Image (tube, coloured by chain):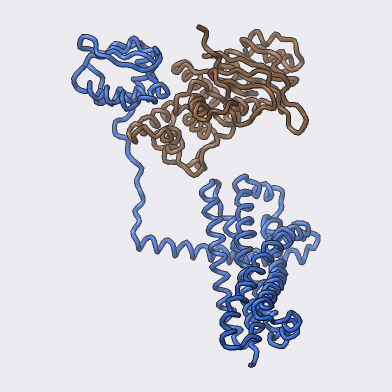
Amino acid sequence: MSQPAVVELSGISTAFGGSFIHRNLNLRVEAGQIVGLLGGSGSGKTTLLREMLGLLRPTAGSVSLFGFNLNGSDALAQRAVRRRLGMLFQHGALFSALSVFDNIAFPLRELRCLDEDWIRRLVHLKLAMVELEPSHGRLMPSELSGGMVKRVALARALALEPELLLLDEPTSGLDPDRSQNFVELVGALQQALGLTVIMVTHDLNTLAGLASHVAVLADQQIIAFGPKDEVMTVDHPFVTGFFGADRRKLL
Amino acid sequence: MSESPRLHLESGRVVLSGHWTLAAMLPDLSLLQEQLAAQRGLVTDWDLSTLSRLDSAAAVLLWRTWGNAWPAALEISALHRQVLERVAELPQEIPKPPRPSLHPIVFVGSLLLKAGRNLRGMITLFGQLLLDIAHLFRYPAEIPWREFTANIYKSGAQALPVTALVGFLIGVTISYLSALQLKSFGADIFIVNILGISIVRELGPVLVAVLVAGRSGSAMTAQIGVMRVTEEIDALSTMGISRTIRVVLPKILGLTVAMPLLVLWASAVALLGGMLAAMLQLDLSLSYFVESLPRTLPVANLFIGLGKGLVFGFVISLVACYFGLQVKPNTESLSANTTSAVVTAITTVILADAVFAIFTRHIGVPDL
């Protein structure tokens, strides 16, 4: 029996005010893949990510996560599906009224069946995972540096140990050293937890260090999808421009 | 299904199998917890080698079952052992954050200090505004006309319908209620005095002030607050543009100009409502009402009403802008400051109204 794909987009079209962002786009991500989603600015990468999350409904086509159609009407099934994914927003999207601890504890508390001791241990486990001190739990999001916001947001995204992790520009705004740490962290977590990861990124180092597969979004379509060394050889102006001659060495 | 988490006893050892993850455990979590608790302390031999998945939530559950220590015998794959080791490495006692004590006297004191700080801040803002106005007199080219007129439109023109509606209804209400009393004394024609004095001098300005504080005051606080959250205020400063001249001053001047006009409008509509109600209830003709209004209502009352409008508009916008500038970059602070702005503005307006009542007690009261 073949398992259903973790993410399956079929025939997606998205139009904002008459102009098409995506036109009949297809993508199928299998379990365990780390997919880097590439594309020029404004090519609709974040839009695509939001459609996978169900935050945005495509004009046409269907989005399936773990074999469930996300645009279906069964609210309970949709909630169950959303518990199986974690999202790291570009700017963290931490709840600014809650402390770091409460931010990470929030999705756990929402389950309403874990006791406080259990939640406390889990939160500290996640904090340790993203290499933060227990004392950082008391800080408010406005007191954190950019890199810490990213790490707390990752800890929150991982709180329910999702099978699918979506990352929107995970390393933008981090210094190279930090972003390298971040890449190693996500890589280690992926191995330990067997995650499927889809990330939007512009950073070649992140892509080289983390991604197993690459999907290229251009001309309103996924023009190439496959293991990253295969995608590099695709003859398309965006791909050749992105993986320019000297950049190819990175990968 | 082979995926659901299971445990069974097998010749003195506990064997776990299936997916031990939070998502898989959720459907029958309490049952699993019971089953695990039943083994606590009895069995020290655990076989986790047939486990297909173990996440940290399940690891914490197991670790607690084992009483925060490794069991005597454990069979487990290396990958899953890592997950358990991470749980084992956690400090056992995690200190809870200290809660600040709330002694009543400390509470009252801190409230007073906060009120004092706010008062001082508002006076500072007022001083800054005076300096800005002096600056604009020297460099008239920098006067923000566009923002000024936009604010008059937003807080004045767009408030016309709601103030008219509320004014009309209040006029009708007062007229009906007083008419009942006056009728029993046979003093029907005094309805003109009552409506004139109460609406023009008192109710018009206060009513409009309360409406505007809720409508424009909260909008000002929220707008300035969000501009602070998104660092737009800082961006203005970087371009060498004074935030008080460009953001605060047009709001305060705009509302100070618009408020008297709103008061005039709302009072007029309220009088109209009162007139109509008097006609229906007391058979008092509209022409009689209009004729006798100037006789019974000295014109000083109108100026007092407009003066109140001017002061109230200034107070509301000053308070709103001050609290807007106090917003810290988080949602809690934004909501707290918006609430403070509206509550403080309305309270200050009522206070100012009382001061007005005391100092104008000899002015504009008609001789009977």
Q: Say if B280 sits above or below B242 in the image.
A: below
Q: Say if B150 sits above or below B282 in the image.
A: above
**Where's residue B178, x and y in %?**
59, 79
Look at the image and tell me whether residue A40 can be seen: no
- Quarter residue B1 falls in: top left
Instruction: Choose between A212 and B183: the one closer to the eye.
Output: B183
Q: Say if B272 sits above or below B24 in the image.
A: below
Task: Say left or right for A168 vs B273.
Answer: left
Q: What residue is at 45 percent from the left and 24 percent from the top?
A: A161
Residue farthest left in this picture: B42
**Where's residue A55, x and y in %?**
60, 31
**Where's residue A75, x and y in %?**
52, 30
Task: Say left or right for B263 vs A209.
Answer: right
Q: What residue is at 78 percent from the left and 31 percent from the top?
A: A18
**Where's residue A159, x and y in %?**
44, 29
Instruction: Choose between B347 and A78: the one closer to the eye.
Output: A78
Instruction: Choose between B158 and A184: the one closer to the eye.
Output: B158
Residue farthest right in this picture: B141
Q: What residue is at 70 percent from the left and 71 percent from the top?
A: B269
Q: What residue is at 56 percent from the left and 60 percent from the top?
A: B341
- Quarter residue B185 falls in: bottom right
- Quarter residue A60 falls in: top right
Q: Say which chain is blue.
A: B
Q: Say if A117 sits above or below B108 in the image.
A: above
Q: Say which chain is brown.
A: A
Quadrant into which the C terminus of chain B falls:
bottom right
